[in-house]
Image: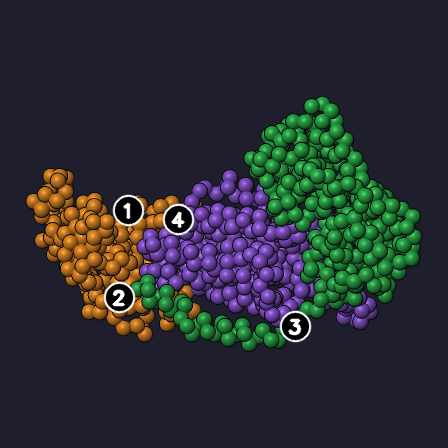
């Protein structure tokens, strides 16, 4: 039971964006994808989401290729959140949030209400709900999209198989407090019954919240494994072309530059 | 759909949320009131209750059923179609300036209808089919324009919104050329028919001509009205909509073809009535909400109300003559369009 | 994936359902009966007439039956009283069904181009008779139109008296015009639209007028009113250009018209042979078009003679 890429390569306009990537995320864990700019992090996330078919290799969900699922079925199994894009029309925040509720979710009104109330509280959206989405700050918009993604994979007892969260730098615009709030939320949801794949920029946060880390460099997997295995000073210094030191504090791995 | 919006959240928020649905109901009331007024007012006075209590003369009765009722109905459905198609296309293109005219839909419909005006008499059509000829020609023209759009986007291998808009610009230029050529080929009488047809009028409504167009429009409108959730999700972006289970390629085709049918069938009977498709959805978003479960029905209702109103003005200000209704809608729409351009940042 | 989804959207099943639904309802739909006649026989009731065409209004005045008129169209400029006295129906091609009904006419009498047809159909259903007069842009056609209008409103003997007293002599005078060996090469222009002259080709009222005065229409090869390029204006070498006053005034009078880039290269402009006349008089094809044709004939002769004197 996993969302897995086997030998995935992506070629666009003659450029190898990804080459022979193997990765799998299982329910109950957070997988962080790190790497310098242009390493192919977002491309890998898109491939895992089924948004763009890989040029070589395959992506499977519970052993079945993504192409074998209908878009509706896939939507029930995994939620995707990319970097925030603007919305042209003046939607209200609650309207954007409710876009995450799938019409074929088995839950009745009560379930939906409970889900919304829970997520509104968890993402601290209470005071924003009736505001226009476009008037929100980038960080506030990210919190709304996060809640929307979590609503999309709200537990549904009638559905077999684990759920997955695919997030592309979900906290890039957030202040410190909200960044930690959201990452804790992601980790908690993952540890319940969902697998999370999170593209991250901040190595310290990746070290702190990820169960496993995938280091991409120039479209290839440079390292994959537990935090201790990947957060290696020599490796990071080489990949980021910046001197990096690793420190340990209170069982936490700290990356220092 | 509209009534379920927000019902799942806390009571304080819900207290604000029921208003959009109420406003939609208000629009219904306004439409019915305007339609009743349009049915009662005209060059010949027909008190509506006189039709019910039987005191109306035979002439009044016949005038009501044969002229005024089909006319108000045509204005209503053509306006509703333009409003609905405008709203759906704006949602599809994520562009508040999108209009059935913009992507070549109206242009294609006009080419089809004008071809029928100029060449129709040369083709001997059976009497019972002649009323289908105009709407079918216009819908065919509109669909050909959108079909061209498909072929073109396939060649590019990518169906982006920008490609669509640019091809729309080219299609409109092409339609202008073809219409110009038809104008050159047409004789004097056809030319004058054409000129007035292009300014738009609801005065040509007769029952036999109305039914075929009405059927096409109702079927397509029913499909469009069911796309509100998909169009909402599309606002997040195409990839996001797909991630939420929307087949965006199919959605685009359904919306474009149904909008073409709704617009084409209306254009066939009323000519080009400008700006309704642009103004109406914008007003609905402003006063009711951006959610497509509000915008689509709202634009349908307001489009009908606006067109009936514009027609009422067109046929009562210079009695016993009348103004082309396109002049009235353009007089309202053109300044509004400039205001929109000034207000909306280019997308 | 794209291919399969497209196929789903256009599945044969869904298209078939549409077609079946459509065809099933087709025979249930009523069809309209034609309500417009084109005959000169007297109609049942011609007590209240809506006239859609300048020549018709003119003829009704000629017959002294203007008391029967209830409304006239925008081309009914002669006699001037008509437009002041009666409500306007608007343009003859763009009649309003309900506006007409409000005037409660018993008869709508129109020129060949009256419309739209749908409006006449609607009026037919309300029991209003519409008669469309055949268009024949010739001197005989004008006489025939007078007879026809009079016939329809039951005044045939009166019409014959008017014709005998006045019109017949003009017709004879026109018929007596000599046919020159080398007829004058004339262009009849409606005016200049978007910088391009709009010329009378064959089958137009303008062409009919030029035939009446035995002139040669230089644009007889094109049919209908057509925009013509500057180059073809120059190439056609018209000796004389005839233009309605309104068309000339739009360019600032005859001098301004002659100076227009599209006109000034023609012999007509260079020799000052531009003839401006009342547009409805020359092109309306009512009784006074007979007078206008005689006047035009004299002015063409005058222009040609004056020019040849100058040579």
Are callouts 1 and 3 both on one chain? no
Q: Which residue is mark 3?
A: C30
Image coordinates for residue B109, horizontal then vertical, percent: 53, 56
Q: Are marks 2 and 1 in contact (CB under 8 Å)?
A: no
Q: Which residue is mark 2?
A: A67
Nearer mark to the viewer, of 2 and 4: 4
Could you give the CA–CA distance between mark 4 and mark 3, rounded to whole angstroms? 45 Å
Using the image as rendered, state which of residue C2 and residue B168 is in the foreground.
B168
Quick one: SS at disc 4? helix
Image coordinates for residue C249, horizontal then vertical, percent: 71, 33
Task: Judge whether residue B283 can be spotted in this image.
Answer: no
Q: Are marks 1 and 3 in contact (CB under 8 Å)?
A: no
Q: Which residue is mark 1?
A: A172
Q: Say the numbered circle drawn on residue B162.
A: 4
Are callouts 1 and 4 both on one chain? no
Image coordinates for residue B312, horizontal then vertical, percent: 69, 54
Chain letter, colour purple: B
Chain hosting mark 2:
A
Image coordinates for residue C206, horizontal then vertical, percent: 70, 44
Q: Give the class, few, some or many, for how many residues have Cα within 10 Å of label 2's Cα (few <14, many ≥20).
A: some
Q: Is residue A36 above or below residue A167?
A: above
Residue at the spot x=59%, y=46% of the render?
B333
Identify the image quadrant of residue B46.
bottom right
């Amino acid at each position: 039971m996993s969302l897995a890429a086997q030998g995935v390569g992506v070629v666009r306009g003659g450029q190898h964006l990804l080459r022979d990537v193997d990765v799998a995320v299982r329910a109950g864990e957070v997988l962080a994808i790190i790497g310098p700019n242009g390493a192919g992090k977002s491309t890998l996330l898109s491939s895992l989401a089924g948004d763009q078919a890989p040029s070589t290799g395959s992506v499977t969900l519970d052993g079945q290729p993504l192409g074998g699922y209908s878009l509706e079925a896939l939507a029930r199994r995994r939620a995707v959140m990319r970097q925030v894009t603007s919305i042209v029309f003046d939607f209200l925040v609650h309207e954007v949030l409710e876009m995450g509720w799938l019409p074929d979710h088995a839950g009745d009104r009560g379930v939906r209400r409970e889900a919304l109330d829970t997520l509104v509280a968890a993402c601290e959206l209470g005071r924003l709900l009736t505001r226009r989405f476009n008037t929100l700050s980038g960080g506030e918009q990210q919190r709304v999209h996060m809640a929307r993604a979590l609503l999309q994979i709200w537990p549904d007892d009638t559905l077999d198989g684990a759920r997955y969260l695919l997030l592309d730098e979900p906290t890039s615009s957030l202040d410190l407090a909200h960044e930690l709030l959201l990452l804790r939320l992601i980790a908690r949801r993952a540890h319940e019954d969902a697998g999370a794949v999170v593209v991250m920029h901040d190595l310290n946060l990746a070290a702190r919240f990820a169960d496993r880390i995938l280091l991409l460099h120039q479209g290839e997997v440079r390292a994959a494994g537990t935090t201790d295995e990947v957060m290696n000073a020599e490796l990071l210094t080489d990949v980021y072309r910046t001197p990096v030191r690793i420190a340990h504090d209170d069982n936490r791995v700290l990356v220092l530059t | 759909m509209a009534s379920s919006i927000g019902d799942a959240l806390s009571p304080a928020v819900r207290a604000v949320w029921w208003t959009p649905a109420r406003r939609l109901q208000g629009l219904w009331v306004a439409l019915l009131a305007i339609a009743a007024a349009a049915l009662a007012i005209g060059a010949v006075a027909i008190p509506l209750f006189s039709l019910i209590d039987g005191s109306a003369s035979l002439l009044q009765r016949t005038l009501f059923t044969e002229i005024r009722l089909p006319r108000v109905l045509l204005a209503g459905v053509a306006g509703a179609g333009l409003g609905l198609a405008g709203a759906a296309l704006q949602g599809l293109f994520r562009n508040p300036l999108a209009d059935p005219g913009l992507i070549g839909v109206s242009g294609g419909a006009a080419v089809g209808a004008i071809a029928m005006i100029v060449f129709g008499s040369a083709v001997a059509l059976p009497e019972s089919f002649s009323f289908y000829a105009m709407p079918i020609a216009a819908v065919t023209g509109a669909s050909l324009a959108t079909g061209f759009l498909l072929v073109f986007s396939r060649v590019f291998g990518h169906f982006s919104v920008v490609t669509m808009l640019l091809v729309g610009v080219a299609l409109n230029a092409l339609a202008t050329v073809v219409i110009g050529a038809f104008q050159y080929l047409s004789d004097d009488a056809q030319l004058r028919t054409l000129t007035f047809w292009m300014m738009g009028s609801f005065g040509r409504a007769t029952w036999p001509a109305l039914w075929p167009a009405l059927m096409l429009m109702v079927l397509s409108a029913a499909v469009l009205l069911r796309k509100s959730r998909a169009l909402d999700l599309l606002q997040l972006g195409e990839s996001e909509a797909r991630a939420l289970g929307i087949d965006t390629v199919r959605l685009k085709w359904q919306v474009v073809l149904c909008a073409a049918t709704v617009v084409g069938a209306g254009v066939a009977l009323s000519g080009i009535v400008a700006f309704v498709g642009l103004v109406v959805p914008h007003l609905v978003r402003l006063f009711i909400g951006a959610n497509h479960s509000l915008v689509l029905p709202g634009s349908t209702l307001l489009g009908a109300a606006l067109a009936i109103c514009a027609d009422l003005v067109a046929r009562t200000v210079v009695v016993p003559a009348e103004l082309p209704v396109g002049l009235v809608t353009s007089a309202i729409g053109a300044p509004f369009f400039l205001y929109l351009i000034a207000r909306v940042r280019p997308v | 994936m794209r291919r399969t989804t497209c196929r789903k959207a256009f599945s044969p099943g869904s298209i078939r359902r549409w077609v079946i639904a459509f065809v099933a309802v087709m025979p249930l739909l009523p069809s309209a009966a034609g309500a417009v006649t084109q005959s000169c026989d007297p109609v049942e009731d011609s007590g209240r007439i809506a006239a859609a065409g300048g020549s018709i209004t003119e003829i009704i005045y000629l017959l002294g039956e203007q008391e029967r008129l209830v409304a006239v169209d925008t081309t009914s400029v002669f006699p001037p009283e008509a437009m002041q006295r009666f409500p306007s129906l608007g343009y003859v091609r763009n009649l309003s069904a309900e506006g007409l009904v409000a005037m409660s006419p018993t008869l709508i009498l129109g020129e060949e181009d009256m419309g739209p047809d749908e409006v006449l159909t609607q009026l037919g259903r309300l029991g209003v008779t519409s008669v469309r007069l055949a268009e024949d842009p010739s001197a005989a056609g004008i006489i025939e139109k007078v007879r026809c209008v009079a016939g329809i409103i039951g005044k045939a003997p009166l019409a014959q008296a008017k014709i005998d007293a006045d019109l017949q002599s003009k017709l004879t005078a026109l018929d007596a015009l000599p046919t020159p060996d080398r007829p004058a090469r004339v262009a009849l222009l409606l005016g200049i639209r978007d910088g391009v002259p709009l010329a009378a080709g064959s089958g137009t009222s303008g062409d009919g007028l030029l035939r009446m005065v035995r002139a040669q229409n230089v644009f007889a090869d094109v049919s209908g009113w057509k925009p013509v390029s500057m180059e073809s204006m120059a190439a056609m070498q018209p000796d004389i250009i005839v233009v309605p006053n309104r068309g000339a005034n739009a360019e600032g009078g005859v001098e301004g018209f002659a100076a227009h880039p599209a006109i000034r290269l023609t012999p007509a402009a260079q020799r000052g042979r531009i003839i401006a006349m009342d547009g409805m008089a020359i092109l309306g094809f009512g009784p006074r078009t007979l007078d206008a044709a005689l006047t035009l004939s004299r002015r063409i002769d005058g222009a040609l003679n004056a020019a040849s004197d100058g040579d």
